Structures are given as C-alpha cells and as structure tokens.
Image (spheres, rainbow, N blue to C red):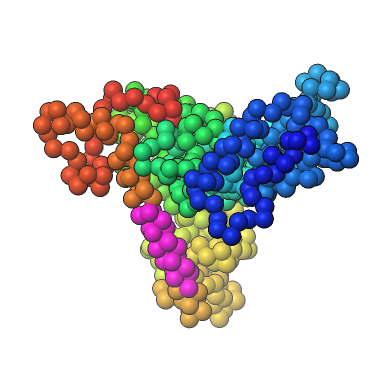
Amino acid sequence: MDELLPQLLSFPPHPPPAQPLSDEQYDRQIKHLAQILNQTPANKLVGSVAGGGDLLDILDPSINTLPYLYVLLARNNAAQGSGKQSNNALPRTSVPGGTLWKKMVDFLARFDGRQVRYAGAEWRRLVEFVAKAARSISDPLQAIQPIRTAILRLDPSAATFTSTHHLFARLCLDANAYTVALPILNTNIIYFPQRPLAISYAFPCTLNQKSYGYITSESGLSARVVYQDHLEYHLYGALILIALKKWERALDFLELILSAPNYHNAPSTIQIEAYRKWVLVGLLFGGRRLQLPRTVGQQMSKSYRAIASPYEGVAEVFRSGTRSRLNEEFKVGASIWQDDGNVGLMHQVLEAHRRFAIINLEKTYSSLSVAEIATRTSPQPHDLAETEDYIRRLILRGHISARLSQPPDPSNPVVLTFLTFPSEGSESQSEAAQNVKLKQGTELLRRLDEHVKETNKVMAQSKELIDWQKKQNKSKEPGPAGGPAGMMDVGWDDTIADEDMMADF
C-alpha cells in the first residue's frame, strides 16, 4: 500500500498547475491512473496504510474520485464475501446506516463528474448497489436522493436517457416519493446512448460538451437500454406526475408512449395502459376528450379506441351527460377500473365533472343563483351551503373568475356572477403570471432550438443517414434538401439496423 498510495494521489496534480491541463494531457493522465487501478488486486485496495489509517479517510471523493470509487467497490465486495451475513442478506455495513453505506452516499454527493467518465461501469455498479442495498431493507426511499444527485452530477441536463433514469423512476414509484422525482422528470429526454460519433469531442473529459458525447453505448455509464426501458420510464414518470396532479406534464409523458413507433400497428401492453390513463387525465386537465397526437397513425388510433372502449364511453358521458349518468357509468365499469388500477383516477373524474360543469356555465350565463347551480351540478342539490362552499373554493383556486353576492333580500339565494373584466388586483396578478409564462416559453424555445441544431449534427454523422445517402447517390436521386436541416423528411428504411434503444421493435 505504501508504494500504491503515491500513485493513487498522483492525479489530479496537487497543487493544481498554474496552466490547467489540456484535454489531451488530462485524458492521458487519467487513463494511466485507471489502468493502474484496473491492474491492482482488490486485496491491495482494501489494505490499510502505514500507521493503520483508513485509505478512504485519506482520499477525497471530490478530488481523488477514481481511487475512492475503486477502493469503495473493493471494500464492499470484501464485506459481502466475509460470510458473516446469513442467506443472501447484505452486510450491515453496506446497508443504510452502515459505515460503508455512509461513504457510498457521500461519494455520490461529491464525486467529480468529469473523472467518472473514465470509470463508467464502476460508477454504475455503485449506483445500482445503493438501490439494491436500500431495497434489501424494504426502504427504497433511502436510495432516491443519492441517486438523483448522482444523475445530475454526471449530467446536469439529465437529457441523455440512461438505465439510471429508469432505475430512479422505479424507486420513486415504489417508495411513493413523488416530489423528489420532479428535478429529473421535468427535464426532457433528448438523446440516447449510442456509438461514439465522428463529430463527438475528441476526449470524454472535454468540458461544456453535450452529455451524449460522453454517455455512449461504450462508456459503461449506462447499461444497455432498449425500447421497453424508454416506454417504462415514461409510464413510471406519468404515474408519479398523476399522483402529484401535474396533469399537463403527465399528458406529455403519456403521449410520448402513445406516439412510440410500432412496426406491427398493434399497441403494446404499456401503450394500452398509457392510453387508458391518457383519456382520464385529459378529462381532468381540459374537461374533454383530447385529440391524439398527429404522430399516432390511423391504425394505432383505431386500435387504442377499440381496446379501451369503456374509457371512451366515460369520455363521451363526461362531455354530454349528467352527473347521474356518469355515476352509472362508474358503477357499471367498477371491475374494469379496479383491474386496470384506475379507481382513484375515476373518482377524480367524477369530481372534475362537477367542476367543469360549473366552469362551462360561463359560456351561457353571466350570473346564476347558487340554488340553480346546485340543481344542475351538485350530488346534493338541496344542500345550498355545500354548493356555495364548493364554488367559493373554485374561486379561491383560480378555476373561475367570479364572485358570490347576497341579494338585498336575505330570503333570496346567493348569486354567482362571472367576471368578464377581472378586478385591478386580479388583472395585475394575471399580467405578472403571463409574463412569467412568456419568459419560461422563450427559454424553452431557446433550449429546444439548441437541441434541434445538436440533433441535426448527430444525425448528419449517423450510420443510418450515411447509408441512406449512399443509396440515394447510387439511384442518382437528390438527398434531403439543405443537408442536415432537411432531415425530418428522410424516408427511413425498415431494413436499417436498429440501435440498442430500438432493439425490441
């Protein structure tokens, strides 16, 4: 160990040189360190240093990321191989509360994201072990925050889909930990691990590169991801967003599943489940049955509707029927909603029907008595106090712009008046909210434009497009107008070799 320690501490140079290492120097030196670590027997990595100190106390995970990671894995393997635990149970030191667990969590919070690009498989092993250890004591919640932190330290954009995304979403679902998932779920998946491209940066360590440049199919930072993983991740995400009542974002996730290509024009089990939830969430979000995205083919649309016909019936009754009819529809299909795991959503649909019935009154009336509203919408039409309280909550939550007023004669019912022109305070708040949304939309478009340009660059160098262009040249037909910018019109061939992401088609 005395001979090994100086080598483990050799990178990065300390103190830092006056002139920062070039990418080429950084790449060469860290690869040399990784080679030393890969060639060092595990028993040497778990040995003690002179004086009986702990190597993990000498190494700093934020500076000596690779040595710390390798020593941590070696320690963990040694603990599991000690034979002190019964059956397949993990050693106490490696599960939440144990000394090694604390060091693993500390590492995931502090590692250098640039260095782990050179030890992808080892980094992923640690992340997956943290999830396994938390599950081994039936407490997946313990792993969620460390893994979320690890994803964002590796890729602050979280825009390249990895097996860790899938693992994280499943953990959050299992632990009923929904809010903590939002920093990942609120980012859009843009890229997938693929073969390193000719346009990629020369070195994994290059700063300010897009994450697809270093999270590749050969980096080890992600296990092999396939079509099924992509669908499952978005279904898990949709379920989490539904639990948080973030209907619009949940619809985005569900529509990605519904739009996923399928060569057989027959929806998969995941797509059918997504469609059922999509119909109900659409009612909760917009008070009506939504139109499927244009990216969903006609045959797939017919298949969805045929397979999920009970949900189509609910959407139709929601649009044109009364609450009593919707209640009857709910009772008739009770076993269906139960089997599909949609009872909770159906209860929310029943409540939403009343809310949208009141909202839609504004299309016809400028004012209406609470008694009349109760007759039209309330499950208890004679309880005017309950209806008045319900309307007041709708106003406070911003569902309707209206006011309740008591006529001069107290014997007359309270009246709901819809406000055509909001009050000055409300107008001011509305304008401020619109400005915020405008800024958010502008920033979203800016990022989208950046990703489109980057994706065009990737596609321009992809094997599939190059093969297609060769075929076009042979047939003397012109390629896509404008080069990469016109690639959205490329007629892809079914014979194109699939990437791992598409391997399950």
Task: Work out whether residue 327 can be spotted.
Answer: no
User: Is 219 within the magenta?
Assistant: no
The quadrant the N terminus occupies is top right
Q: Position of residue 345 (x, y in %)?
A: 55, 42
Closest to the observer, 204 or 128 = 204
Residue 92 place in picture, x, y as percent: 83, 32
Vertical side of 482 occupied by 304: above or below:
above
**Magenta highlight range:** 432-450
Residue 72 horizontal/vertical position (percent): 73, 36
Q: Decide: is 431 above or below 124.
A: below
Which residue extends farthest right? Answer: 51
> Residue at position x 44%, y 30% from top?
501
Q: Is residue 54 visible?
A: yes
Picture quarter containing residue 74? Answer: top right
In front: 466, or 168?
466
For the C terminus, which image quadrant? top left
Give the left or right position of residue 17, taking residue 493 as reference.
right
Left or right, 136 with reference to 458: right
Decide if residue 447 is on the left or right side of residue 121. left
Relative to 272, 113 lies left or right: right
The image quadrant that residue 306 belongs to is: top left
Nearer-the-camera pick, 174 or 223: 223
Q: Residue furthest top?
A: 87
- Residue drawn at 57 percent across, 79 percent down: 409
- Total marks in image: 0
Q: Is residue 115 above or below residue 298?
A: below
Residue 431's x, y, as percent?
45, 74
Check the image and name the residue furthest to the left.
Answer: 476
Name the main secondary structure of what is drawn in magenta: helix
At horizontal 89% and vertical 40% (from top left) the residue drawn is 51
Query: Which residue occupies the foreground of this view, 171 or 267?
Result: 171
Q: Residue at x 42, y 35 (%)?
A: 196
